[in-house]
Image (cartoon, rainbow, N blue to C red):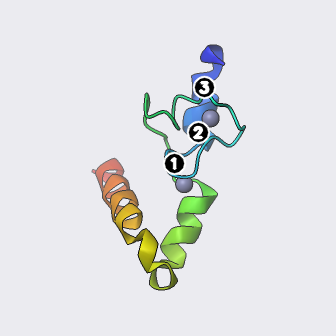
Amino acid sequence: MRGSIGVHTAHCCKWHGCKYGDDDCPVANGEVEQEYPCEGCDRDLRDEKRVREKLVRIEEIKRWQEAKKN
Ligand SMILES: [Zn+2]
Ligand SMILES: [Zn+2]
């Protein structure tokens, strides 16, 4: 789906995968940066205390969100 990369950057996640189950997703493959945290990202951030095994990724999400703000 090369003609609709914008759809992927708006909805897919490099941590949680393509929202549309597209194996060729440019976000999941790391070719482009997603524009927003996905629902899974929001959930992970809220559950931070309960998901210690995911802390590395959560830290990465936080850094990425900070970078977007600046
Ligand atoms: Zn996608
Ligand atoms: Zn996500």
Ligand 1 in which quarter: top right
Residue 28 percent coordinates (x, y):
53, 38
- Residue bearing the label numbered 3: 24
Earlier-in-chain disc, 3 versus 1:
3
Q: Quadrant of residue 1?
A: top right
Q: Secondary structure at mark 3?
A: loop
- Residue bearing the label numbered 2: 10
Residue 46 percent coordinates (x, y):
53, 76
- Amino acid carrying mark 1 in the image: Tyr
Residue 41 percent coordinates (x, y):
53, 61
Decide: few, some or many residues near mark 1? Use Cα within 10 Å; few <14, some 14-19, many ≥20. Answer: some
In the image, farthest residue toward the right: 20
Instruction: Using the numbered discs, state the Cα–Cα distance from disc 2 to disc 1 in whole angstroms.
Output: 6 Å
Residue 41 vertical position relative to residue 55 in the rendered view, above or below: above
Of circles 3 and 2, which is in front? 3
- Amino acid carrying mark 3 in the image: Asp
> Image point 49% across, 41% down: which residue?
35
Earlier-in-chain disc, 3 versus 2:
2
In-front residue for pair 29/46: 29
Earlier-in-chain disc, 2 versus 1:
2
* Residue 66 placement, left or right of 22: left
Determine contact: label 3, label 1, CB under 8 Å: no
* Residue 42 placement, left or right of 68: right
Indicate yes or no: mark 1 CB to ligand 2 under 8 Å. Answer: no
Residue 25 percent coordinates (x, y):
59, 30
Determine contact: label 2, label 1, CB under 8 Å: yes
- Residue bearing the label numbered 1: 36
Q: Secondary structure at mark 2?
A: helix
Q: Quadrant of residue 61?
A: bottom left
Instruction: Using the numbered discs, state the Cα–Cα distance from disc 3 to disc 1 in whole angstroms.
Output: 19 Å
> Image point 59% across, 69% down: which residue?
43
